[in-house]
Amino acid sequence: MTPRFTAEQRQRLEALHRAYLRDLPGKLRAIERAAASLSPLDPEGLRALLHLVHRLTGSSAIYGFDRLSRASAALEELLLSAAEGASLAARGGDPALAERLAALRAEAASAGDRG
Amino acid sequence: MTRRALHRVLVVEDDPDIQVVASLALSDVGGLVVEVCGCAREAREAARSFRPDLILLDVMMPDMDGIAVLEGLREDEGLAATPVVFMTARAQSHEIARYRALGSLGVVAKPFDPETLAETLRGLWEGRDS
């Protein structure tokens, strides 16, 4: 039989959900900062950004923000290609990067509104 | 012969937001004894001291990936036989086959369902060697 949350466990999960939403703007700011400071000469910066975005992709899905997770996964995919040497080459001003960051920002704002 | 039930799980996951949900799912909901390790490089030491029945291991971590952690565990005489279940958002069939070939007991897809995570691990635990 599939276990079900008790009322207390559900309350704890809802509290975690609220805390996640509270922290979401900070996660976005960290991603934006890391993206703004990308440089082709700094592969570590790209790896750090990829890590932040990867975390957001996974955690937002677990907390039920599916659209935010998909937007984050799209950005992650682009960064993975860059990390593997694709043409993005870690340029902070890359149009594809800017577009996916904007989509991520919009979904984060929307998640905040729904939460 | 009755098999010993799954009791102790070490979760190796770097993201605190996921750690807390995994702990709730395995400990509060699943009734398991859970230890969380947030750093892949410390996983071997954490496993040595906690002595888990099973290790739930994130694949993509910043300091070291899950596959390298698994290789390290397999080199350790005391931990070589401890079953490892990978957690990953990339759980397509060829990737699952690769993780199985590396010696993992199974794969939990992210996002996991907190209500059934413990049940999933128990199923893998009970089905091992079968």
Image: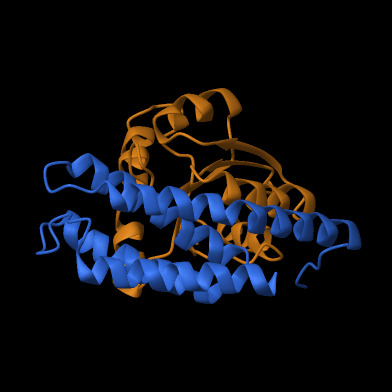
Chain colours: A blue, B orange
Q: Is residue A90 left or right of residue B82?
A: left
Image spot of residue B8 (x, y percent): 65, 40
The answer to whether residue B14 is above or below residue B46 is below
Query: Which image quarter holds the N terminus of chain A?
Result: bottom right
Image spot of residue A104 (x, y percent): 43, 68
Query: Which image quarter holds the C terminus of chain A?
Result: bottom right
Instruction: Name the residue: 44% across, 74% down.
Output: A70
Instruction: Name the residue: 80% across, 54% down.
Output: A12
Task: Work out which residue is located at the far right of the displayed protein and give it.
Answer: A7
Image spot of residue B118 (x, y percent): 67, 57
Q: Is residue A72 visible?
A: yes
Image spot of residue A40 (x, y percent): 12, 48
* Camera-nearest residue between B20 and B100: B20
Q: Is residue B59 visible?
A: no
Q: Is residue A19 left or right of residue A34?
A: right
Q: Is residue A91 left or right of residue B65?
A: left
Instruction: Name the residue: 64% across, 61% down.
Output: B117
